[in-house]
Image: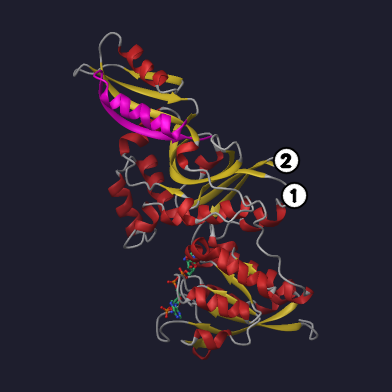
Amino acid sequence: MKDHYRNLRVAVLGGGTVGAQVANRLLNGANELGQRSGAGLELIGVAVRSLDAPRSAPIPKKLLTTDAASLIVGADIVVELMGGIEPARSLILQALHSGADVITANKALLAEHGPELFAAATQVGAQLYYEAAVAAAIPIIRPLRDSLAGDHVTKIMGIVNGTTNYILDEMDQKGLSFEHALAEATRLGYAEADPTADIEGFDAAQKACILSSLAFHTAVPLANVHREGITGVSASQIEAAKRSGHVIKLLAICERLVDPVTGLDGVSTRVHPTLIPRTHPLAAAHGANNAVYVEAEAAGPLMFYGAGAGGLQTASAVLGDIVSAARRHVVGGPGVGESTHADLPSIPLERVTSRRQVSLVVKDQPGVLAAIAKVFSDNGVSVETLHQSPAGEDETATLVIQTHRASEASGQDTVVALEKNPVVVKVTSVLRVEG
Ligand code: NAP
């Protein structure tokens, strides 16, 4: 390395799955990273909870400390990889106010306190980087923020939670029940002992919140993200999806729409199990992988695919941010604030239109199809396709009906009316369709 390079002091907060890998690479790849950054990168310490806990990659004992606040003092770049809200939030604010650039992979913190952190960064002219917070190794933050800055993103559909994708993929590929697939995910370490954050869609909602805010230049509050998990997805729904040429994925959908009530532009951000055609690019995301499908006015559809978790994989994104931060220090000048100039309102789910697939068991008797079609049309929902499976010995038949776009309210009213109709034995599944 050239000896006139500026030396930048890097503090890493957290030496766990991701932090240990980042620290290890900073120690063993410093020269190469320095060449790419135009600055020397010196790891000044790694803050942990316990000095004696095992590390997934070796960190010299002399670099470990339990005093994160002191470690930050004098650092040029602070990398927060502790997770959780506190003390991560306070430490990031401390780092920004001391003039350091901050890198974080903490989606929970960004989803809940992003505006506060971005405002602090802007106030002091520092930069907050978070490439690893959504879909880990997959570059998606920088493409949205920089590469597509001259375009208008209209829609993002993301498989942003590896655990749920693994579970749904196992159900699809092997015909497993949800419970069996979850047990497999837990055994293999894809699901945590308490899988609630993943299977109930909280993790995906945090990532949707980050993506929507970034793509639409609007601070989208986490409370405005509609969230449904995958615990209600059954093996029979997966089978029915297969028969109709679809696959069920938990999608984070961020969409720019015209609010039908106000007539104004707005943003819909929602997470729910979704039917997509098996030919859609997102259907090719198997196992615990993540994929993000972006539609932009000029660029058209774009697909980003890869590992959405893992220490080494996530460290790749964090190290990219470290190099970016170092380059910025070399060039100088204030950081680029998070753009929220569009300031679009969130559109509640009730006003969003979707296509739906409704599966129901009906009595096998004359006039049933006409009665069912009337329920849909009475509620303003137009039917796109209808498939009837042959009647069984119990004199019932199964109908799978795909609708055109209709509002959430009309869709829900239709299901309520179907359930009350005397020819309907049971509504077995209702899923929104995309793609
Ligand atoms: P982790 O394995 O649980 O590691 C957390 C680290 O932070 C540990 O080293 C822990 O110390 C330290 N720590 C926690 N609280 C602390 C405190 N109060 N003071 C000092 N140190 C503290 O977590 P991780 O999986 O590396 O995840 C780190 C961040 O990356 C999280 O925000 C996570 O959401 C994000 N992320 C992770 C992945 C992934 O695949 N793991 C993917 C994308 C994003 P000890 O080791 O002493 O306990």
Amino acid type, mark 2: Ala
Q: Is residue 281 above or below residue 375?
A: below
Q: Determine crowd level at label 1: few under 14, some 14-19, many 20+ residues with C-alpha closer than 10 A.
A: few
- Judge from the rendering whether residue 13 lies leftward or rightward of residue 330; answer left or right: left
- Image quarter (top left, top right, bottom left or bottom right) of the N terminus: bottom right
Amino acid type, mark 1: Gly
Which numbered tag is attached to residue 106? none
- Judge from the rendering whether residue 293 lies leftward or rightward of residue 326; answer left or right: left
Q: In which quarter of the image is residue 49?
A: bottom left
- Label 2 to label 1, Cα distance in Å? 9 Å
Q: Where is residue 304 in the image (x, y as percent from the top left)?
A: 60, 49
What residue do we see at 52% from left, 82% from top? 46
Asked whether 131 falls inside the magenta stretch, the response is: no
Asked whether 409 falls inside the magenta stretch, the response is: yes
What residue do we see at 70% from left, 74% from top? 326
Q: Considering the numbered disc 1 on the image, is that residue within a helix, a strand or a loop?
A: loop
Q: Considering the numbered disc 2 on the image, is that residue within a helix, a strand or a loop?
A: loop
Q: Position of residue 8 (x, y in %)?
A: 69, 82
Toward the top, the furthest residue is 366
- Asked if labels 1 and 2 touch by Cβ distance under 8 angstroms, the answer is yes
Toward the left, the furthest residue is 394
Residue 305 at least partly seen = yes
**Residue range corresponding to the magenta coloring:** 407-435
- Mark 2 or mark 1, which has the lower sequence index? 1
Q: In this view, does 359 lie above or below 373?
A: below
Q: Which of 91 and 141 is in front in this view?
A: 91
According to the picture, the residue beneath numbered tag 1 turns out to be: 150
According to the picture, the residue beneath numbered tag 2 turns out to be: 298
What residue do we see at 25% from left, 14% from top? 364
